[in-house]
Amino acid sequence: MNRVFLLFITWLSITATPLAETQKLEVITTLFPTYDFTRHIAKERVNVTLLLPPGVEAHTFEPRPADIVKLNHADIFVYTGKYMEPWVEKMLKGVNDKLLVVDASQGVELLDDHDGEEHHKHDHDGKDPHIWLDLANAQQMVTTITHALAQKDPANAKFYEANAVEYKQQFTDLDQRFKTMLATVKHKSLIYGGHFAFGYFAKRYGLTHDSPYQGFSPNAEPRPKSLAKLINKLKQSGMNYIYHEELIDPKVARTIAQETGAKLELLHGAHNISQDELQRGVTFLELMETNFNKLKVGLVAP
């Protein structure tokens, strides 16, 4: 009897270790960049969920009751910041106090919402939330997420930190390529028929950013005066491309293209991705690489 009991205890000790090792952190992120950053830092050691359904435009998203239930079963919640997701504060009321809430904009200097000529008021209280489109900011976001993972799972801290170092080097390399290429392009204006999303990007690489919209809300209407000014600038510059944003019908950009004869081209802001892109496993850096190639053609690199 004692031998049977000892065998049972031995079996328990053997099986308990794999069970403990297979327990993974549950991480929920709001936008695609934070989702993809977390995937690359943590790899198979955590379960990462994108709160934003694929194909949904980020600025119009409103959390559902089911999303709050998900949060109550999560270990870490990563969002971009209060200017991008103003609904987060309300959503977090009543969730479990063990949830580690991570504001990925920590350590990032936020820009005012302007294009160098006019200041636009909008639903983000005058701050531009598209911080991830500056690749230096993206690296800071990776650092913040890494610290959170290490804090919640210290046993795997070195694993997360090593992955982050390797991952951030890829950002550094692409950032340098953007700097080199955009320093030599013929046109220095980023003419964007979508909402004002590429402010950080334009500042980092010495471009001007022109959009006919006031602010970031997809419900906003383009200003007629700004639209006419943009059409005139495109005609005078000799540029042959007008860029538009993802997941929204580019009706304004299409109008500008028809008026000027310019070609319509997607420049991905990476807020979110489509169902097809999700199934294909597209990454943030792949989206930025595609943007690199489209800007190289559109702005005419030598």
Image (spheres, rainbow, N blue to C red):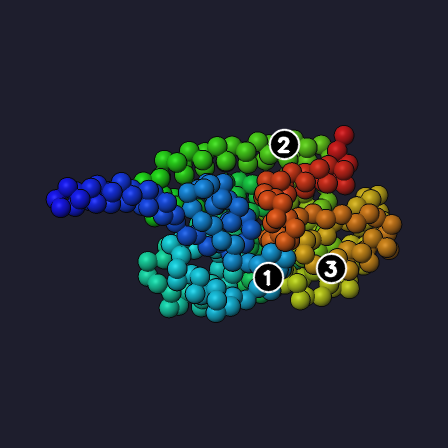
Front: mark 3 or 1: 3
State how far apart marks 1 and 2 are (Cα).
30 Å
Kind of residue sitting beneath label 3: Asp
Quick one: label 3 or label 1, which is nearer the N terminus?
Answer: 1
Q: Nearer the viewer, residue 206 or 171?
A: 171
State how far apart marks 3 and 1 are (Cα).
15 Å
* Label 3: which secondary element: loop
Residue 49 x, y percent position in the rendering:
49, 53
Estimate how packed mark 1 is, as few (under 14), some (14 to 19) or many (20 or more) residues with alpha carbons within 10 Å.
some
Total marks shown come to: 3
* Relative vertical location of residue 119 with respect to residue 64 in this rendering, above or below: above
Residue that label 2 marks: 177
Estimate how packed mark 3 is, as few (under 14), some (14 to 19) or many (20 or more) residues with alpha carbons within 10 Å.
few
State how far apart marks 3 and 2 are (Cα).
30 Å
Kind of residue sitting beneath label 1: His
> For residue 228, which numbered disc appears in the image?
none
Quick one: label 3 or label 2, which is nearer the N terminus?
Answer: 2
Identify which residue is drawn at 28% across, 45% down.
16
Q: Nearer the viewer, residue 210 or 15?
A: 15
Q: Is residue 298 left or right of residue 14?
A: right
Residue that label 3 marks: 249
Residue that label 1 marks: 59
Q: Nearer the viewer, residue 88 or 211?
A: 88
Identify which residue is drawn at 29% across, 43% down.
15
Residue that lies at the very extreme toward the front in this rendered image: 1
* Label 2: which secondary element: helix
